[in-house]
Image (tube, rainbow, N blue to C red):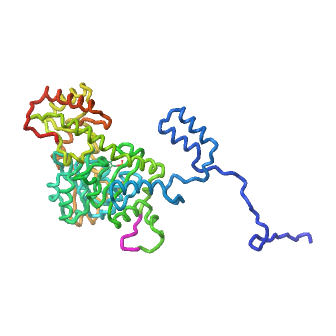
Amino acid sequence: MPNERTVQKLALQGGMKAVTKIEGKGQPKIGREEFMAVAARFGLPQETLDRINSVIRDEDFGAGPFMANYYSGLKETANDAFAKVGRKIFGVKYALPISSGTAALHAAFVAAGVGPGKEVICSAIGFYATAAAVVMAKGIPVFCDVDESLHMDPTKIEALINKRTVCICPTHVMGSVAKMDAIMKVARKHKLTVVEDCAQSCGGKVKGKYVGTWGDLGIFSISAYKIVGGGEGGMVVTNDQRMYEAAINLAEGGGLWRPSRFAEERYPGELFVGTNYRMSELEAAMDAVQLKKMPALVKRFHNVKMRILKQLKTYREIRPQTLNDPDGEIGYTLRFFPESFELGEKIVAALNAEGVGCGMRGPKAPPDWHIYHDMFPLVLRQGGPLDDCPFGCPRYLKAGGKVEYKRGQCPVADDLFDRNISVGLNQWFNAADCKHVAQAITKVLDAYCTPDPKGKPWL
Ligand SMILES: Cc1ncc(COP(=O)(O)O)c(C=O)c1O
């Protein structure tokens, strides 16, 4: 019959399979070229790159793991390994690798119960990201003045506490540490959570205990610009399971981390919308190695600073930065306060001429994100584009909230931030280098100041 069609038996019915094999050979998603691009990024000499290339030229990487933690199919991802190092070093139950210190702060504030109508007490000297993350969590930052340690002054916290306050966030500044024992006392008395911002002092300790483990949550920036880290990364640490789960819920899309993504809430507040702050596997692999190196690196910095401080004399016109815990000091900068800007300018010029790199902001410095009154655009009280939330939020206004950010609110910070001389130290200084730096400081201070054996000691 002319119109008869031949219908083949379906594979379902026991017929021949139409596709028995795919012949086109695929390439791995992450292959040799990508591997070489990473090696080249780290500035390896061409000769080394050629050698690596010749070794791996014919290798088939297979489908290989992606550079992502999510659904990697691996038993232990680089993120798992990084978290393990974090838990071990800091002696905490939970460590969450995350894409940056800012992301870590956002997750930590959400976990700490920051939200509309709530206030967080932050350090007047620190970094913009801390206060910005409070706003991202829909809370309001309020700044606490510092003392001569350049850290949050524990005696000034209580005056800032009101019914809207939920959290205190001390920042450990530039390799030094805040007075955590005193801060915790105030926080516990008023039942406030504590988030420690350790971005600038990863590895610092107070009374032998790592900063980041005193508070309810600790955050770290593990980035190229900090003493530990190679690219952009961060970590949140805590011993509290619920807080950990809230932090990971924010960081992992709101539920991806749970055994069953679409299961019912297992407890009130478990689920809420989240974002993607996951750390890339490449970064995690590098940061796990970096973090392991941290204790040795901190010890080298610490020894350099102590060696230099021990050789310095005291002077009437100079007040050294107070070290809240000299034993827990990392020490990548050495700071002191000259009695006037004029004296400071002379000292800075003379020290630089002696070969000791240092600086002082002085009275006419441009704005700086590390002091509260310059934290632009926070000071505009702008939560989003054309959006005055959380500053104009009815929940905040109804609770009597009103905040402004202006120079003059934290007078000690205003003064000391501009008037401190900062000498950069290097972990690789040997004993002779330390001696020469100490001699240079003494030479310059002898020339411009009055020795005073009863002056404020350096240590
Ligand atoms: C005190 C402080 N907190 C948070 C951050 C933010 O970290 P990241 O740059 O990793 O987002 C920084 C970065 O400089 C910082 O100094």
Chain part drawn in magenta: 266-273
Question: Where does residue 46 sit, x and y in percent of width and height?
Answer: 53, 32
Image check: 280 left or right of 15? left
Q: Is residue 137 visible?
A: no
Image quadrant occupied by the C terminus: top left
The residue at the far right in this view is 1
Asked whether 441 or 270 is in front, the reply is 441
**45 drawn magenta:** no
Compared to 128, does 43 lie above or below? above
Question: Where does residue 380 sit, x and y in percent of width and height?
Answer: 28, 50
**272 drawn magenta:** yes
Image check: 18 left or right of 148? right
Question: What residue lies at 47% left-to-right and 38% top-to-bottom?
Answer: 42
Question: What residue lies at 57% left-to-right and 49% top-to-bottom?
Answer: 30
Question: Where does residue 95 sit, x and y in percent of width and height?
Answer: 37, 58
Compared to 432, does 102 lie above or below? below
Q: Is residue 426 visible?
A: yes
| Count of picture labels | 0
Asked whether 41 or 429 is in front, the reply is 429
Asked whether 401 or 269 is in front, the reply is 269
Asked whether 185 or 104 is in front, the reply is 185
Question: Where does residue 213 sit, x and y in percent of width and height?
Answer: 29, 57
The residue at the far front in this view is 431
Image quadrant occupied by the N terminus: bottom right
Q: Main secondary structure of the magenta part?
A: loop
